[in-house]
Every structure is written in structure tokens, then in C-alpha cells.
Image: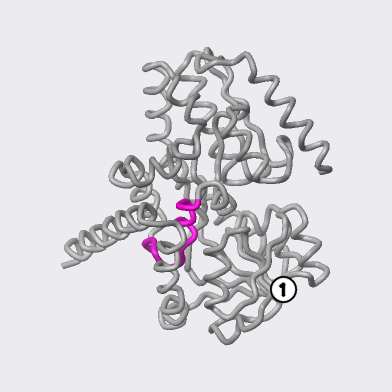
């Protein structure tokens, strides 16, 4: 989309919201992804719950990628200004909220994806001063985390060791921690706009890609790649965020309605991503001859060792508050692991 058209779209959205207040009947909800994605299915379920609980007094207008524009910075600017009061923000959000790059660290979260959802949405983490203030300093409020499934590598060659990734031009989101991580693995990470990625892979401008399974299928990336590699290094995590002024201006009833809906969506969101990724992997396998590689624990361990120092890079980059948020996550992960160990004994 032309820059002029993007600007026009945002101006139109701003004008639509110019007379709205926290008591507005319509909540606009911006997505980083297209229809058919995890974010879209989550937003539609969220919309249904809000509209049912409000007896139709509040409606949710879902704005997928492309409706509001195609530059993620445009979306984040619209949230900060209040033109779009609710949205998801993921890897690209690191440019606006550096601490959010915590979600991009590899080999931090538990292997069980439901556990990840519960840890990141726990009051201990989500309501912590470290996490809340990281966003509020940028006129945003973090409301929830949505793990969207494991990030899966694709390439035109098999990748089973760090040596296999040597020099690979793999596309990553515009996120310094991701670049550092894949440089540590030996790759040559590059950043390409999401809407331009298919042609870049097709033409060889990028040699590899990192996406959840549903995105590989939804955008057809698997059609121009030969291998799909499951390394279980990280889950793609989207942050549900709100404009601070909008959120703080909600009535008590609206706040309770929003909070209860978000609580319900933790389990629902995990079901959505699990079902959608399983369904899309079957579609990929049925419609291509792409080769599936699943790394074993020893193979993952080599990548895990290379990723471990990036935690220190994260703290050095974003500061003490980011370190506090990381410590909370690690404490929760370790406590969960201990609980499982006790259950097995």
C-alpha cells in the first residue's frame, strides 16, 4: 500500500474516533495479521463475548492487517494516539516498547504451550510494575498475552545443527534481540515487510523464514520453501494492548467486562492456536511435498546453549526493568517445572 494511502486510512480512523470517549459504543481492535489467523479468530471470539455481555451496547470492530495499513509502526502510532484503542503488538513492538522483546527470547518459556499462556497471563507477571510501567511509559497498557504457536523455521535446505544455519539469510521481524539470536546461531538475519515476504522467498532474496505454522499456510510461504523445521525455540507471542487514556477512562462496569473477557480468552486463545496450527499443518502436508524435520533434545540443546547469552543482551539493551520482568517469568517457569516434578514423583 502506498504511504499516502496508509496515512489516509489512519486519518480516517482518527476522525472516526475524534468524538468518541471511553464510553463509546464501538471498540476498534487492530490486528497485525490477516483474516484466518490466530489473532483474527481470537478477536472474533473476543468480539462475541463483549457484545453478548454488554447486551449489544458495545460493539467491537475488528481491523485486520491491511485495513488500517501495512506498516506496523502506523498501527502502534494509532494505538498510542487513541485512534485505535485496542490492538495486538508482537515482535515489531520492540521499537515502541523495548521491554516487549522479552517475548522474542529463545528457550525461555516452557515447552507446554498452555503453561506459557498461563504464566504470561498470571497476575504475578502481567500485573507486575515492571511489565505495566514498560508499556504505560509509552501511553499503552498491557492486557494479556496470546501465544500463537511455536515459531517454525523454513528453508531450502535441512537445518539440524547451528552449522546448517551458517550464513543463512533468514527473515526476522525488525527486532534487535531476534537479530542477535539468529546471528548467534550463525545465520545472516534480514528484515522484510510481511506483505513482501512471499515474493522475497520465491525470488531468493530471503533463504529462510520464521513463522507459526498457521502463518506459513495462510500466507503460502510453504509453497516456496523445501523444509519445515520444528526446533521448539520459541512461541510467537502477541501482546494485547490498549491505549492508556482509553483504558483508564473505562467505567467500572466496562473494566469488569473487559477483564472477565480477557480471563476467559486465555483458555480459548490456547484452543484457537492449537486447533488452527494443527489444521494448517495438515493442509501443508496434504498440499505440498515439503519435508518436516523435528529436532530432538540433543539438537535443541546446541541451539539453546547459543541462545542463553542473549538474555544478558536483552537486559543490557532495555535496562533493569526488563531484567525484572525476565526474572518474574523465569521464577514462574521454574515454579511450574517444580510442580510438575512433584506430580511425577
Asked whether residue 274 is in view, the answer is no
**Way the structure is coloured:** one colour
> Vertical placement of 312 versus 259: above or below?
below
Tell me, yes or no, if residue 186 can be seen here. yes
Residue 130 image offset from top left, x and y in percent: 35, 46
Residue at 55%, 65% (x, y): give it.
Answer: 178
Task: Say which quarter of the image contains residue 39.
Answer: top right
Q: Considering depth in this image, is 325 or 49 the residue closer to the camera?
A: 325
Give coordinates of residue 253: x percent, y percent: 38, 16
Within 10 angstroms of label 1, few (less than 14), some, or many (20 or more) residues?
many
Q: Secondary structure at mark 1?
A: loop
Q: Nearer the viewer, residue 119 or 17?
A: 17
Quadrant (top left, top right, bottom left, bottom right) of the C terminus: bottom left
- At x 63%, y 31%, the residue is 62
Q: Position of residue 215 (x, y in %)?
A: 64, 55
Percent x, y for residue 188? 65, 75
Q: Is residue 131 magenta?
A: no
Query: In the figure, is residue 328 to the left or right of 185?
Result: left
Extreme residue in the bottom direction: 163
Which residue occupies the foreground of this view, 205 or 112?
205
**What residue lies at 57% left-to-right and 34% top-to-bottom?**
80
Q: Specify whether 256 is left or right of 246.
A: left
Q: In the rendered image, which quarter contains the N terminus?
A: top right
**102 magenta-colored:** yes
Report the span colored magenta: 98-110
Residue at position x 47%, y 78% from top? Answer: 303
The residue at which mark 1 appears reads as: 207
Query: Quadrant of the rendered structure where residue 3 is?
Result: top right
Amino acid at each position: 500500500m502506498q504511504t499516502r494511502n496508509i496515512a489516509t486510512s489512519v486519518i480516517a480512523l482518527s476522525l472516526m474516533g475524534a468524538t468518541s470517549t471511553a464510553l463509546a459504543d464501538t471498540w476498534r481492535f487492530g490486528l497485525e495479521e490477516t483474516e484466518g489467523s490466530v489473532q483474527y479468530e481470537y478477536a472474533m471470539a473476543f468480539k462475541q463475548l463483549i457484545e453478548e455481555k454488554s447486551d449489544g451496547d458495545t460493539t467491537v470492530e475488528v481491523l485486520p492487517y491491511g485495513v488500517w495499513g501495512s506498516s506496523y509502526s502506523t498501527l502502534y502510532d494509532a494505538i498510542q494516539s487513541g485512534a485505535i484503542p485496542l490492538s495486538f503488538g508482537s515482535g515489531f513492538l520492540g521499537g515502541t516498547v523495548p521491554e516487549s522483546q522479552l517475548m522474542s527470547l529463545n528457550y525461555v518459556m516452557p515447552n507446554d504451550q498452555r503453561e506459557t499462556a498461563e504464566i504470561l497471563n498470571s497476575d504475578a507477571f502481567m500485573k507486575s510494575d515492571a511489565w505495566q510501567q514498560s508499556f504505560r511509559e509509552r501511553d499503552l497498557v498491557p492486557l494479556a498475552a496470546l501465544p500463537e504457536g511455536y515459531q517454525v523455521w523454513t528453508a531450502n535446505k535441512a537445518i539440524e545443527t547451528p552449522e546448517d544455519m551458517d550464513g543463512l539469510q533468514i527473515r526476522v521481524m525488525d527486532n534487535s534481540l531476534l537479530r542477535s539470536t539468529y546471528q548467534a546461531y550463525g545465520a545472516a538475519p534480514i528484515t522484510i515487510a510481511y506483505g513482501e515476504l512471499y515474493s522475497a522467498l520465491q525470488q531468493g532474496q530471503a533463504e529462510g523464514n520464521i513463522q507459526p505454522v498457521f502463518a506459513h499456510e495462510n500466507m503460502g510461504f510453504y509453497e516456496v520453501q523445501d523444509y519445515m523445521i520444528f526446533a521448539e525455540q520459541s512461541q510467537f507471542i502477541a501482546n494485547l494492548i490498549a491505549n492508556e487514556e482509553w483504558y483508564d477512562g473505562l467505567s467500572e462496569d466496562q473494566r469488569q467486562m473487559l477483564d472477565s473477557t480477557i480471563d476467559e480468552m486465555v483458555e480459548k486463545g490456547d484452543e484457537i492456536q492449537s486447533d488452527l496450527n494443527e489444521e494448517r499443518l495438515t493442509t501443508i502436508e496434504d498440499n505440498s511435498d515439503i519435508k518436516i524435520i523435528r529436532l530432538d533434545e540433543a539438537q535443541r540443546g546446541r541451539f539453546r546453549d547459543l541462545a542463553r547469552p542473549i538474555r544478558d543482551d536483552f537486559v543490557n539493551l532495555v535496562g533493569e526493568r526488563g531484567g525484572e520482568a525476565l526474572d518474574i517469568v523465569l521464577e514462574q517457569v521454574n515454579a511450574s517445572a517444580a510442580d510438575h516434578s512433584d506430580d511425577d514423583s
